[in-house]
Image (spheres, rainbow, N blue to C red):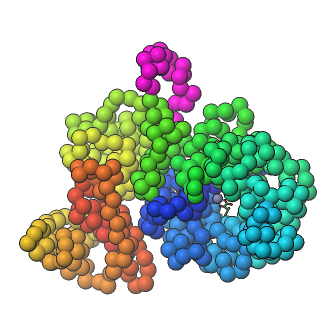
Amino acid sequence: MDKNRVYVFDTTLRDGEQVPGCQLTTVEKIEVAKELEALGVDVIEAGFPISSPGDFQSVVEISKAVSEPVICALTRANTMDIDAAVDALRFAKRKRIHTGIGSSDMHIKYKFNSTREDILKRAVDAVKYARKFVDDIEFYAEDAGRADDEYLARMIEAVIAAGATVVNIPDTNGYCLPDQYGAKIKYLMDHVSNIDKAIISVHCHNDLGLATANTIAGVMNGARQVECTINGIGERAGNTSLEEVAMILKTHHALGYHTGINSKQIYGISNLVSTMMRMPVQPNKAIVGRNAFAHSSGIHQDGVLKHRENYEILNPEDVGLATNSIILTARSGRHALKHHLQRLDYKLDKINLDEVYQRFLIMADQKKEISDADLQQLMGDGDEKNYDDRAIKVILLQVVCGDPLRPMATVKLKINGTEKEASAAGNGPVNATINAIHEIIKDDIDLDEFSIQAMHGGSEDVSKVNMRVKHNGQSYYGFGYSTDIVNASVNAYVDALNKIY
Ligand code: KIV
Ligand code: ZN
């Protein structure tokens, strides 16, 4: 085992998603999970299955959609929660159960109305029970930041003996100072006799603005897993931000630690999460804020132009940020498009550039400028997929709507080479279009989740549509993008149909 490898555990979809107003649909969570996979995280905490049917379903679907990272599900220390997690993880190729209980006297007394000995027994029982179903068990000692070190060490030793493979030492309330938190991790390294049988994980909250500093202190004292979220989102002041930890370890490479993060994906996923969760990134946020690489004073601009490193310790391109003045518009050629795709780390040998360029021109015709987020949407719709292989394609879409008109749609589809056309009415243009598709497909398909989102907000914007449809009791997901919301909806619906047939 590489002793300097730091594993990245992303909890954007669990701790991050607990923030009021940040809830995502299952389809959106799948999209984030796939981007997390491309980013190179080691573990995705996909949800808390017992907490709601939606969370349960998200863990199921993310387990099917993602293959590289370990998929983790959260539980409390009881058999019902663990049973639900085992069930939700049944499709995961690599799975982990994350179970745990409070470890501070505060939690033991005022949350559980219990005793240290009883809580220790419940912790051990939960780990032993979970271990019957899954080999990879992470135990969290909630509020470890405020727990007594001697008791914490006993608890950690007992859960490792019971089968825990990772032990999470959360600073649940963001209470610790970096040297205190680092000392706590060192204490466990020195006093837990079987610590070599498990990885110590650090999970820090940002109530005092110290989450990243505490995480790094944890790593420097022996932790080898960091728990973070994209943009640092999370309860109250948030969790440790993934991009900060990844770039600190990369920038300070002399420390010798390394992660599997592909830093060029950072800016893209930061945008995606912020847009989807409707949670703007503060302009001066380290690494991903709008001003993180903006130099406004004359002295700094002059210094940067003379030698970038005078005022930049990070290369903006390393986090996937454009730094040049090549702006993409409808007048840009293939060369400019290729330059930006390469910069965003798309594999050009797997892309049909001519085909992407045609779709780019259609998008660029309808927008003043094409941003990185637009390009990512464009590629999400086409990257590494060969559209010629699709069984069902839209050949024509015509919609009439307005007030007092009755919405009508005509759709022509090419299904395995044969063209079929139908028209239908509906209570709106999207409903009319889907009714027309049903006239052609004539199968029992129900649309049961549908969301439309503008990527940036302007009326000339690209909209993104997520859909979930049901067929023979199975759910299928579809995504579509267009500056026309009806078009985007048809693209999403046909994307789902292609997954069915
Ligand atoms: O902050 C915390 O203690 C948690 C645990 C559930 C891991 O999120
Ligand atoms: Zn937390």
Ligand 2 shown in quarter: bottom right
Q: Residue at x 25, y 38 (%)?
A: 329
- Where is residue 87? Give x, y as percent: 61, 78
Total marks in image: 0
Q: Is residue 408 above or below residue 353?
A: below
Nearest the camera: 443 or 11?
11
Question: What residue is drawn where x is 34% and y is 52%?
Answer: 455
Find out whether residue 267 is within the magenta segment.
no
Q: Decide if residue 82 is in sight here.
A: yes
Q: Quadrant of residue 501?
A: bottom left
Q: Viewer-proximal residue, 206 or 356?
A: 206
| Location of residue 26 in the rendering, given as x and y in whole percent from the top left corner | 46, 68
Residue 308 lies in magenta, yes or no? yes
| Occupied quadrant, residue 493 | bottom left
**Side (left or right) of 113 relative to 483:** right
**Magenta segment boundaries in residue numbering:** 295-318
The percent coordinates of residue 482 (x first, y second) are: 26, 56
- State the residue at coordinates (57%, 67%): 47
Tell me which corner region of the image, top left, top right, bottom left or bottom right, holds residue 94. bottom right
Along the viewing direction, whichever of 491 and 429 lies nearer the viewer: 429
Is any part of residue 319 visible from this angle? no
Q: Is residue 262 above or below residue 295?
A: below
Is 218 situated above or below 395?
Answer: above
